[in-house]
Image (tube, rainbow, N blue to C red):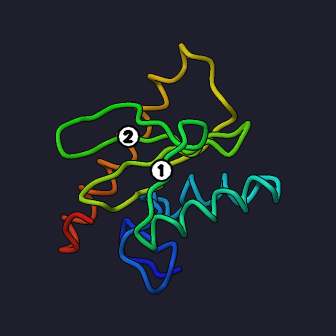
Amino acid sequence: MTALGAWKRVYEDSDTEWLCVRESGRSDADKYVSKLPEKSRTRLQRWLEMHKNGHRIKSQENIKTLKVLGDIVVLELKPQPYRIYVVEKAGCWHLTHGTKKPSNNQVPREIEKAVSIYRDCERRAKGHGHGTL
């Protein structure tokens, strides 16, 4: 993975999949994904590769749009029974964090967390001249 300030590439040869990196230098998403069971990690990897290659994940069993906020969309990738939260902007995926499948009343908090992590990374990237990815 290649680091670029507040962002870290998932793939060296792609500018469309990114990990959001906190000011502390850690990525909540990377840390969470690294602890997933192999089957769930493999499924997530396949979906990221599909996105990288310009293919869409069509099944609502695998991906869900949670919220549209202007030019960003909060997505939930669902390698059962886990959830990986993604902020999509201009065709790029920014992985923010993950959790076990939350109850319905917890989903708004996960959306807020995803947006907060993304906005923080975006703000820091702009401050370092990297702009928005």
Say few, some or many: other residues with alpha carbon within 10 Å of mark 2 (under 14 / 14 to 19 / 20 or more).
many
- 46 sits left or right of 116 in the view: right
Q: Is residue 52 visible?
A: yes
Given residues 73 and 9, the one toward you in this image is 73
Given residues 43 and 94, the one toward you in this image is 43
- Position of residue 3 relative to residue 54, above or below, is below
Q: Give the residue furthest to the bottom.
A: 13
User: Disc 2 to disc 1, how far (Cα)?
Assistant: 10 Å
Question: Which amino acid, mark 2?
Answer: Val
- 68 sits left or right of 56 in the view: left
- The residue to which callout 2 is attached is 74
Name the residue located 22 percent from the left edge and 63 percent from the top edge: 132
Given residues 21 and 96, the one toward you in this image is 96
Q: Give the residue furthest to the top.
A: 105
Q: Secondary structure at mark 2?
A: strand
- The residue to which callout 1 is attached is 96
- Position of residue 110 relative to residue 1, above or below, is above
> Of the numbered discs in the image, which one, if any, rests on residue 67?
none
Q: Earlier in the sequence, mark 2 or mark 1?
A: 2
Say few, some or many: other residues with alpha carbon within 10 Å of mark 1 (under 14 / 14 to 19 / 20 or more).
many
- Residue 54, position in %: x, y? 40, 69
The image quadrant where one finds the C terminus is bottom left
Question: Which amino acid, mark 1?
Answer: Thr
- Position of residue 121 relative to residue 72, above or below, is below
Q: Is residue 18 visible?
A: no
Given residues 68 and 1, the one toward you in this image is 68
Residue 74 image-quadrant placement: top left
- Residue 124, position in %: x, y? 27, 60
Name the residue located 63 percent from the left edge and 64 percent from the top edge: 46
Number of numbered discs visible in the structure rendering: 2
- Residue 53, position in %: x, y? 45, 73
